[in-house]
Amino acid sequence: MRRVRPAVSLSALLLSALSQNAHAQVVRVGVTVPTTGPAAVLGIGARNAIALFPKNIGGMPVEFMVVDDATDTTNSVKNAKMFLDQKVDLIVGSSTSPQSLAIVEAIGGSETPMIALGASARIVAPMDDKRRWVFKTAANDSLMASAIIKHMVDNRIKTVGFIGFADAYGESWLTEIKVLAAKSNIRLVSIERFNPKDASVTAQVLRVIASRPDAILVAGSGTPATMPHKALKDRGYTGKIYQTHGAATADFLRVGGKSINGGLLPVGPNLVWEQLPDGYPTKANNARFVPAYEAKYGAGSRSNFAAQAYDVLPILEHALPIAAKAGKPGTREFRAALRDAIEGIRNLATNTGVINMTHSDHSGLDERARLIVRIQDGKWVLDTVSAKR
């Protein structure tokens, strides 16, 4: 006997099919960033920047799912695996190097593109099967470290002390500084480590001062990076104090106050775009993004981390139309074509710098992504522009 399906069920099936087809046309992006925990200031900037994205990018509707990982690598991995279960086309995050590296290891083999927001060069190098699918918008630590070493050489620094996070970020910076300082005949006379949640770094600061370095590098990120800086000043250290680009936030300036005046650090050009010479390759992008960001989130709210997250937008504007020719969102063909399109980016000016991806370089940034600024009364003051233009 032939069974007749009720009309209402057929309609439901048709609606379901249409809904699934429409859903399949939407590019889905999973974003995991820390909006709570020690690195919240980094993740909040990223979240805020992504909230400015248009609904359609490169002619395609795009859905961003932003979740908090609470500055915890376990949560970062958990979020990334949840995104894989949901068949996203791209994963963005996290904001710190340890979290980004944890995601790289966890999703290897999934053949899903990832754009990390962490800075460590180890996120994208050395190139292997896992990193073939991984890109990043933050400049590599090595690029920023070389700017610091050049500034030290120009200022006749002969010895340097190091106080860095006891994690992958601090380790990456220590590795870079050891190599670059040795090449420039700068002697590394002391190495100390601390944790972002430590209540005091007095013992480490006293040991570094005792080594009598001409300059000291603090390799930390966000507001915890103010702690050694303030302790050095409190203990009477008068040499140059360098910070890394991980410290470049408005909260770092606020918490550090006058005690961090005179500090030097490499940053992305968006922080001081008004002070850049006309014709600087990022200036037009910075002039569009920074005023729009500060109009929504307040004067002085700009940060490198917001700019790096916003640079996902021009990357997708370039790559999505290319990927769409190979398949529909949600398919392996689309994800593979998206990966290839990102790797094929050449001379793309963004807020962070000018991107030239290659098979072996999935950061793609050069000297145009860095400047040296000096901290003065809660503001970033352009000190050195050493980039080619």
Image: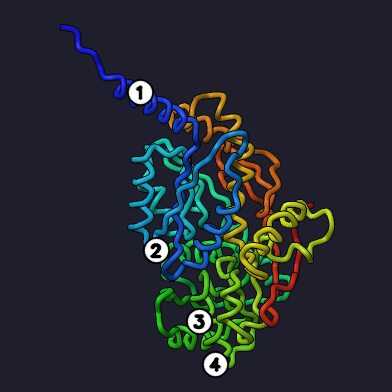
Determine the secondary structure under disc 3: helix
Question: Marks 2 and 1, how far apart in space?
Answer: 44 Å
* Residue 269 visible: no
Q: Amino acid at mark 2?
A: Ala
Whole-percent x and y of residue 127?
49, 42
Q: In the image, is residue 305 above or below residue 19?
A: below
Crowding near the residue tagged with mark 3, few <14, some 14–19, many ≥20 C-alpha atoms within 10 Å: many
Tell which circle, 2 or 4, labels the residue nearer the N-terminal end: 2
Q: Amino acid at mark 4?
A: Arg
Determine the secondary structure under disc 1: helix
Please tell me the numbered disc located at residue 11.
Answer: 1
Tell which circle, 1 or 3, labels the residue nearer the N-terminal end: 1
Question: Marks 2 and 4, how far apart in space?
Answer: 33 Å
According to the image, what is the colour scheme of the structure? Answer: rainbow
Q: Residue at x 64, y 70 (%)?
A: 265
In the rendered structure, are the residues bearing label 2 and label 1 in contact, judged by CB atoms less than 8 Å apart? Answer: no
In the picture of the structure, the residue carrying the numbered disc 3 is: 227
Please tell me the numbered disc located at residue 235.
Answer: 4
Question: Marks 2 and 3, how far apart in space?
Answer: 21 Å
Whole-percent x and y of residue 9?
29, 23
Determine the secondary structure under disc 4: loop
Crowding near the residue tagged with mark 4, few <14, some 14–19, many ≥20 C-alpha atoms within 10 Å: few
Crowding near the residue tagged with mark 2, few <14, some 14–19, many ≥20 C-alpha atoms within 10 Å: some
